[in-house]
Image: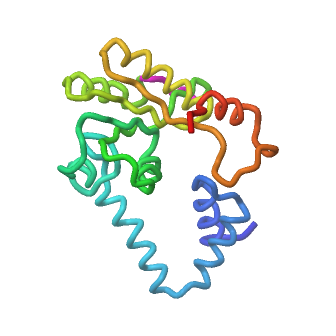
Amino acid sequence: MYEGAIQDLIDELGRLPGVGPKSAQRIAFHVLSADPADINRLAGALRKVKELVRFCTSCYNVAESDQCRICRDPRRTDEVICVVEEPKDVVAIERTGEFRGRYHVLGGAINPLEGIGPDNLRIRELMTRLGGGAIRELILATDPNTEGEATATYLALMVKPMGIAVTRLASGLPVGGDLEYADEITLGRAFEGRRAV
């Protein structure tokens, strides 16, 4: 549509997840009209994240040193590991303030249609961590979709023989939601996960 550098920028922005052609065009024109100092800060932040950020050697969360801040925290319990798909899931759980254990980031979920099997995830590393004998509970916090469920089922089958308690995050109705707008699967899970009051 456009020529030269602006079209190259639109094309590159369009390759980002969640950025469609119209959003890419809006961002590109915002960059074009933005203050050069703002653009230099953005470019610097992009370079810095590629240079400094790596994966934690223990849990595979993002970190700027060998271990992330959660793995370095001595106040957290080593007896419970929460398994998530991506580092952004760690942030979501941390915002609740409810979990004080450790994490393990798989790096995705089992998805045969996209060629992602158990060997493409950090399952082998998880099994090594569990083999130490200090873990008493494994919380499966994969996404409540087909891929997340397949991953959780696979992990549960792998871990059960080790004598470690395996739990799954509850799923159901959101706070403030209306029953009439809930889909059948969500409503069914809400019934399965009901508890005494």
Return the x and y of residue 179 as percentages of the image width and height: 77, 44
Q: How many numbered callouts? A: 0
Where is 131 relative to 101, above or below?
above
Tell which residue pokes out farthest to the right in this image. 180
Tell which residue pokes out farthest to the front in this image. 197
Q: Which quadrant of the view contains residue 80?
A: top left
Q: Is residue 99 magenta?
A: no
* Highlighted range, magenta: 114-118
Where is 73 relative to 194, above or below?
below
Q: Which quadrant of the view contains residue 41?
A: bottom left
- Residue 55 shown left or right of residue 171 in the figure: left
Return the x and y of residue 66 as percentages of the image width and height: 20, 49
Q: Nearer the viewer, residue 191 or 167?
A: 191
Colour scheme of this structure image? rainbow
Return the x and y of residue 3 as percentages of the image width and height: 69, 70
Q: Residue at position x 44%, y 20% from top?
A: 156
Q: Residue at position x 50%, y 32% from top?
A: 109
- Residue 21 shown left or right of residue 87 in the figure: right
- Residue 105 shown left or right of residue 133 in the figure: right
Where is 32 relative to 151, above or below?
below
Q: Nearer the viewer, residue 174 or 19?
A: 174
Give the overall secondary structure of the magenta segment: loop
Where is 157 relative to 54, above or below?
above
Give the position of the C terminus as an image quadrant: top right
Give the position of the N terminus as an image quadrant: bottom right
Q: Residue at position x 71%, y 51% from top?
A: 177
Q: Residue at position x 26%, y 57% from top?
A: 64
Return the x and y of residue 191 as percentages of the image width and height: 66, 30
